[in-house]
Image: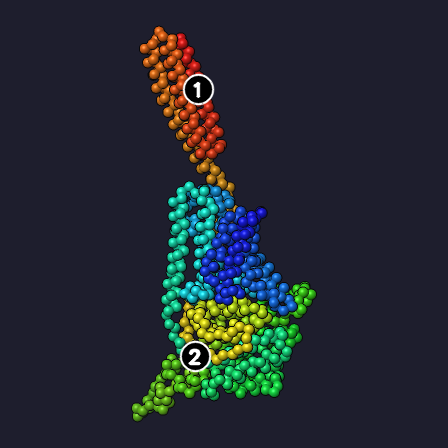
Amino acid sequence: MNISILQVFCAVFSGIIQGTAISNSLSHLGQPFFALFALAPLYLALYTSKSYRKAGLLFMIQIFTVHMISSFWLANYHEFGFITLGASAFGTALKGFLCGIIAFLYPSTLVKNQGALKEMEENSGKRPFEPFKRALWFASAWLVWEWVKSTGFLGYPWGTIFSAAYRWKIITQLASVTGVWGITFIFALFSALCGEGLLLLRKSIQIQNQKAVSSNYRQLAFFTFTVFSVVFVYGLLAYITPINRTKSLKTVIVQQNIDPWEAVDNDAIVKSIKLTRNELEKYKENESPDLIVWSEGVLPRAFPKARTYYETHPEPLSLSDFIASTNTPFIIGGRTLINKNKKYYNNSAFLFDAAGRFTGNYGKIHLVPFAEGFPFENNPTMKAFLKNIVPFVPSYRKGKQLVLFQIPIKRYQDEETPLEYRNDLLRTVTLDEEGRGSRDDQFYFSENTERNPEGYVSFTTPICFEDSFNDVCRPLWLLGSEVFVNITNDSWSKTAVAEYQHFIIASYRAIEYRTTLVRACNSGYSAVVDPKGNIIADLPVFQDASATIDIPVYERRMTPYAKYGDWFVYLILISMSIYGIYFFIVNWKWPERRRRHFITITFQTCINECQENLETEKEEVSEKNSSSEKKVKRVSKTSAGSKSAKKTAEKKSGKAETKITKKTAGKTVKKDSEKSKKKTMSSKTKTKTDSSKKSGIKSSRKKSLSE
């Protein structure tokens, strides 16, 4: 089960290339070109493996390398960063090991049962679709790996191939159809094409039909480039096609650049008030914003009891009084006490109305693993373990309710509601006895008293890395959200790489649902992203900053991904499951039958060929012997009384026979050695037998001549 040094090198090298392609210190937005080739060395290592365990270990090495390169900043998570980095690395590598076993399911057919026969047939060009099936299986397996890595409680979509594709906007438009998983698939497919080329170079000596094998590889290349061409054409059309903009929301984003873990009491609030006031002073009273957004974790005291506290604090100007002075709704991050006896809290986004009153909140549903929550943390044994390892036991619990916020747009409040937004499906108009209509009917068909939907914006507030998960964002969008307003605190990472990596992953939500994404972060990367993934506005990372942005709100369109979710992943999983069932039935239920069938065909074919060769050689020898006998008779007739003539004839016939036997023996040995060593031995034995018979015939001829 030893892994070769070359295989380990390939796995590590693949991890290094992928880590370089993802957002890093040298390239904050990543290098998608490197991502095209990142998995090629891993492909080579996988298809040269000889066991499931070895394949799983190779996957584990590659994935661990990527994790340590791309997520090293997890070690900065305060006093127990080693737990966050170590636990996430262990969990990610373990899942990678299991996915490596799945990835080896198809390559295992090359080392078991008819694997040798398949390889010989492929080298002779008799299996034209074998490279295609290998590449397709690898791309599917890698897609499943990134999906498993990015979903569920332990989901962590950092360090993924699709995150490296951010710069290529035309390619990333595919996310509106397949989600990010389609992007992962085509990049893995291209790497598989490159890896297949490396396999061809490795076994070039063994290839018997170079032309046919090269043609098979060209077919795979043609398929891969066809897929990329289709994706490119779709992406180009989607990118250049305009999306209908229905309204806009003037919003102030505040980035106070204070880590709440290090802040003293109300420091974050005081600094946020200062930055907000400075931003509002730039505009006139009639140009006041519609919404002001502060980041996650600004309010240190828990709601709902903190309502009364913030009516008087911080001094001298309380939070409630400041909000009322702006006459603008606020979104601010804090926490909610959801169980006083058990001291359970919920990470929350609070909505304050224009009068400074707390109106409602959304509770975070997807918690950060090994930071806000631990597996089995309610178990007494786990609690005792955590108390000894980390400075505190996480007391956060996930929210259970989806919340949609609706706020008015100030510029539309004085406009009448268009008649097209009347909601009544049936209206009866009746005239009196004199044939006159009522004033109510006249008013009803002249004015619309319903609320103007153009004058309101519906938005949702995914918190922190919830904007990276579709199990949260998709239900929020289906709820009626027109804009995603994300509040985040990544300041503890102390690195710009972490900020950009989070932003890149979150930006795909805008493309998937063709909506606007607003990010108000503690230290960055605060930005506004349009439905095509373009950055409309942003703030520099790790700086005190604020900005007023006219956020575009677009017409809601049901994209294929918004409607069907991870349908592409499910399709791949079903296809792989069908093959897995077929694989286990064939290799576990009828393995001996398949093996006997293989041996019988191969052995019988070889024997038949050897017998045909021997019979051909015998016929040639007999013909040459008969011709030599005729020559001897002619010589004996012409010089019957001369002894010297007899001797000369005997010498000539002997030399001819010797030459014939040497040639026939050489031909037989040469042909049989090309088959196999065992068959050569048997053919040599038979040749010797024939030669002994010939020598017997010689001696008898000599006696007859002497007589």
Q: How did the renderer colour the structure? A: rainbow
Task: Please give the name of the residue rendered at 30% of the width and 91% of the height, measured from the top-left corner.
Answer: 435
Residue 213 position (above or below residue 33): above
Q: Which residue is mark 1?
A: 693
**In this rendering, position of residue 607 left or right of residue 333:** left
User: Looking at the figure, which quarter contains the C terminus?
Assistant: top left
Q: Position of residue 570 (x, y in %)?
A: 47, 60
Residue with the most extreme front position: 26
Task: Please give the name of the residue rendered at 50% of the width and 65% of the height, measured from the top-left corner.
Answer: 27
Residue type highlighted by circle 1:
Lys
Residue 613 position (above or below residue 110): above
Q: Nearer the viewer, residue 238 or 302?
A: 238
Give the SS element for disc 1: helix
Q: Nearer the viewer, residue 604 or 221?
A: 221
Residue with the most extreme left position: 435
Task: Please give the name of the residue rendered at 39% of the width and 54% of the height, measured from the top-left corner.
Answer: 223
Give the SS element for disc 2: strand
**In this rendering, position of residue 343 left or right of residue 158:** right
Mark 1 or mark 2, which has the lower sequence index? 2
Count of numbered circles in the view: 2
Task: Please give the name of the residue rendered at 50% of the width and 84% of the height, measured from the top-left corner.
Answer: 280
Q: Position of residue 100 (x, y in %)?
A: 53, 54
Q: How far apart, in angstroms, are the residues tagged by discs 1 and 2?
A: 104 Å
Q: Which residue is mark 2?
A: 248
Q: Position of residue 357 (x, y in %)?
A: 55, 84
Q: Position of residue 91 (x, y in %)?
A: 58, 60
Residue type highlighted by circle 2:
Ser
- Do callouts 1 and 2 mark residues in contact (Cβ within 8 Å)? no
Residue with the most extreme top position: 641
